[in-house]
Structures are given as structure tokens and as C-alpha cells.
Image (tube, grey):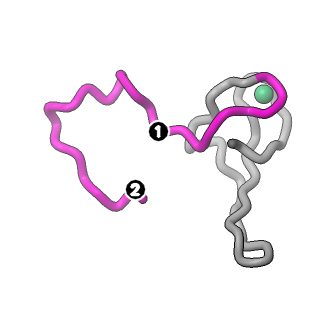
Amino acid sequence: MATASRPDSIDTTAEAETLGACPSCGTRIPTYCHLISYRQRGWPTMFAECDDCGAVVHPR
Ligand SMILES: [Zn+2]
């Protein structure tokens, strides 16, 4: 997903890369909060630590 390089003309502050929203507080979880991802029954599953409430969640 993150293999495409972006031209410098795009404002990178406008839309940060996120994994999804925290199911607990709804905060967008940035990619640097990603902990681990794996496949469970063929479905990709990931864990990330919420930057706001500190919970380890499944971003969605
Ligand atoms: Zn949260």
C-alpha cells in the first residue's frame, strides 16, 4: 500500500497516513503506532497502540 512515492507538491500535513480509527475513543491512529499485524483465518489483523487513550486496539 505504501509503495507508491508521492510528489513533493502534495501537502503532507493535509492528510496523514493512518491505520484507522480507535474503537474506544475514535481518534485516528497514525502508522507509527502500528505494533504488529498478522493473518488470522486468511484475514489480515493488526494491533496498534492508540496515540490518545493508550489502549492496544484493532484500528478500523
Ligand atoms: Zn483511543
Which secondary structure, mark 1?
loop
Magenta stretch, overall SS: loop
Point out residue 26 in the picture as x, y percentages from the top left corner. 72, 24
Point out residue 45 in the picture as x, y percentages from the top left corner. 73, 61
Mark earlier in primary sequence (1, 2): 2
Crowding around mark 2 (Cα neighbors within 10 Å: few <14, some 14 to 19, many 20+) is few
**Residue beneath disc 2:** 2
* Disc 1 residue: CB within 8 Å of ligand 1: no
Side (left or right) of 32 relative to 23: left
Q: Amino acid at mark 1?
A: Glu
How many numbered marks have been drawn onto this rendered protein structure? 2
Ligand 1: quadrant of the figure: top right
- The reply to whether the magenta stretch includes residue 60 is no
Which secondary structure, mark 2?
loop
Confirm or deny contact between disc 1 and disc 2 (CB under 8 A).
Answer: yes
| Res. 27 mark | none
Residue under the point 16% across and 42% down: 7
The region drawn magenta spans 1-25
**Residue 10, image quadrant:** top left
**Residue 44, image quadrant:** bottom right
Q: CA distance from mark 1 to mark 2?
A: 9 Å
Point out residue 3 in the picture as x, y percentages from the top left corner. 34, 61
Q: Viewer-proximal residue, 44 or 9?
A: 44
Residue under the point 79% across and 73% down: 40
Q: Amino acid at mark 2?
A: Ala
Residue under the point 62% across and 39% down: 20
Point out residue 31 in the picture as x, y percentages from the top left corner. 56, 43
**Residue beneath disc 1:** 17
- The reply to whether the magenta stretch includes residue 14 is yes
* Rendered position, 53 above or below 21: above
